[in-house]
Image (cartoon, coloured by chain):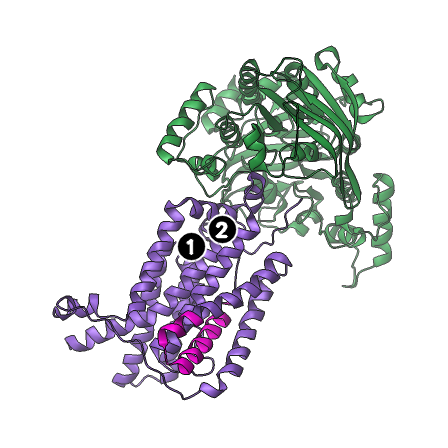
Amino acid sequence: MTELIIASIMTMMTAATPLMFAATGELICERSGVLNLGLEGMMLIGAVFGFAAAAVTGNATLGLLVAATSGAFAALIFGILTLNLLSNQVATGLALTIFGTGLSALVGVDYVGETIDQIGSIHIPILSDIPIVGRLLFGHDPLVYLAILILLGASWFLSRSRWGMILRAVGDSDVSAHAIGYPVIAIRFAAVTFGGLMAGLGGGYLSLVYTPLWAENMTAGRGWIALALVVFASWRPARVLFGAILFGGITILQLNAQAAGLGIPAAFMSMLPYIATIVVLVLISRDAIKIRLNAPACLGRPFRAER
Amino acid sequence: MPIPDSPLLSLTGIRKVFPGCIANDAIDLDVQPGEIHALLGENGAGKSTLVKIIYGVLRPDQGDIHWNGDLVQIANPAQAREFGIGMVFQHFSLFEALTTLENVALALPREDHDKLRARLVETADAYGLALQPDRHVHELSMGERQRIEIVRCLLQDPQLLILDEPTSVLTPQETETLFETLRKLAAERRAILYISHKLEEVRSLCDKATILRNGRRVDDCIPSAETARSLAEKMIGKRVESVRKRATTQQGNIGLQVSSLTTHSHQPHGMDLSDIDFAVRGGEILGIAGIAGNGQIELMDALSGETGAPLGGTIEILGTDATHLNPNERRDLGAVFVPEERIGQAAVADMTLVENSFLTASARMKFSPNGLIDWNAVGSFADNIVRDFDVRTTGVSALASSLSGGNLQKFIVGREMLQEPQLLIVSQPTWGVDAGAAAAIHEEIQRLVSAGAAVLVISQDLDEIFLLSDRIAVISQGTLSSATPANDVTPEDIGLLMGVRHTQQEKTKYAAA
């Protein structure tokens, strides 16, 4: 029984990790005032290119780097369209998702069913060997720790660093930031690119560590859940950690419940994480004012500098 | 220390063209150290464009800028600040979700927050500008926000401070405090460039004035040697016919009766209304004064029915309970509304004037009797508005967004008035409207009242309130003072009512006195 609980908690963390990556990136992006709905597409692009790189070179770490870079490239396209050419952020984001789904399916055709060497869990002598606690704290794969570190880093960046303050300022009032003399577009570009980098990494984690294999549309809506997580966390990184573990937990719970043969249809159980997303969104959106207070005031609004 | 006779800032031949308009043309301007220099002009005269050029937000197409005698290019605001130019914007360049301290830090070079906090408090106290460093801006009043902007400038130790329409959001008392600060700064030989269209203020504060009209400099003068009237004529370029105050007419039946109105604001940073009571009779204008953000928007929305039924209280329009009616049902009773936001609330930017006419007038004017729109009738209605209210437009099929602010406002006011209402509720009737159009709108409102309608005017502009109103009430922090006859109060009395909550007891006491 203890073994089962430990195993569940371990898998819960791995289920939460791609969400943490993607949601942290999106959170930084949205804090700068840009709404990128292309998260799902960027994750898929990261997943397929990362997997392809790992399959070709046999190096999973390189695969992760390629995953992050390809996600960032997808975000750059989004940035050029929305920030330079002032296209509608919602429409462009949706297009990016559709584009990413198609592109990843095309690139991934040859890799369906292939396997690669997985990035294993870390093992720290003595520490990892402590009963129960040892594995729970020191027995995950390195990316779990990386995701948590990046999350904490984002939290520190936003609340403590000067550039974090500038980023928040740009998201709160682009016009004011411009009037004071900050390069609004450049700052948003950096934020969008970081968002893509993290989404790509999240996608890469799925195809290289979590499964590890490539299957068409393998993100299965995790990009959307990560988007919802940002709202759920009311744009605060620390709450993303909590939310990601919660959603990871629900995902694992439904898997375990299916395995235990509870007699509930499998299709219903797999709906659970998505139903949970909707329920949580409805619950926290009840207070419209609170949402609007927390949300970056310029979210989704194009900015054109007068010169 | 600069030589007294050499100007601190000197502009020659400044020209700036935007698509479709010449904002500045051949403008010369000299500002001496220690001088409070006014930049006067109507809306759209090019004042804001000119100061944005000085502050490096905009680049001039032509012309030279000399700073302390040297020819300079000001590429961006950061560079302007390095020179020693500080600016307080008309629409504040503050971040509502950040604290006062963070807002100040953003405009300064990197500095330890604890040291900055100490400097901020010290500077604020030295000039009598009370500030709390750790409060979020969205919690603060307009006056407090402006203090942040000013202190933010002062921390940069500027030699030239630019203020763009600084008093438009201040009470008379706050304005006096600001003037004291500015005089103190001028005594330290800092120059101040003061933009305003409030002539009395300029006369009492400024040493010199440069007047702009249609993007050109038309005159320089010593404001204290002029009258408000002569300044106005220089600004507008023609004789000013001042609107005469109408004699109070015979009062009719109650047009609008509001009792214990209480609402919960739907806006973030909004103001809840609590226990608002007032009545407006036919043939009278009730003016509601107050500083922006004290519940005016919420009151307007509650009266027009836009935000649905209030939490508590009743609204009676022409004797009928309208508390639970929607806007069109209220229009059917005889009411019309002119909200504060021209684009997005009163008019749809991407619709033609004809379509915009249909939007609010269809209920009262019966433009779609069988469910189909009678476009001929709407068209001739729109034609009438354009003709009767002198709306300058290429035609009624022009988009609302193509009209200037003043012309669109005339159109909107006209659209409501031509529906022959018995109750007009109007918020900020002349906000951002030039003097000529404002006078026309004021005259039309007076005419409507003389014909027996009841009118409620909500405005931040005290001059407007006093010009129009028979009785005046003050809205403050979501509460309303009791209304007093306009002849019995001065602007200073009204100013004193602006910062306080109006409780029931106080109202009763006031009524008894």
Q: Secondary structure at mark 2?
A: loop
Quarter where residue A86 is shown: bottom right
Is B55 above or below relative to B191? below
- Percent across and percent down for residue A133 are 16, 66
Chain letter for purple, please: A
x, y percent for residue B72:
65, 31
**Percent coordinates x, y for residue A139 in the rendering:** 21, 70
Name the subunit of mark 2: A
Taking the spot 78% from the left edge, 43% from the top edge, the residue there is B411
Q: Is residue A242 visible?
A: no
Q: In the image, are marks 1 and 2 on the same chain?
A: yes
Circle 1 chain: A
Please rate how many residues cluster around mark 1, counting C-alpha atoms within 10 Å: few if below 14, some from 14 to 19, many from 20. many
| Horizontal arrangement in the rendering, residue A241 relative to residue B324 (left or right) | left
Q: Earlier in the sequence, mark 1 or mark 2?
A: 1
Residue B269 percent location from the top left of the image: 49, 42
Q: Residue at point 56% right, 41% down?
A: A181
Determine whether label 1 and label 2 are within 8 Å by CB.
yes
* In the depicted structure, whether residue B285 falls above or below residue B138: above
Q: Quadrant of residue B300?
A: top right
Quarter holding the N terminus of chain B is top right
Write down the region rendered in magenta: A37-66
- Tell me, by letter, which chain the rendering colours green: B
Would you say the magenta stretch is mainly helix, strand or loop? helix
Marker disc for residue A235? 1
Residue type marked 2:
Pro
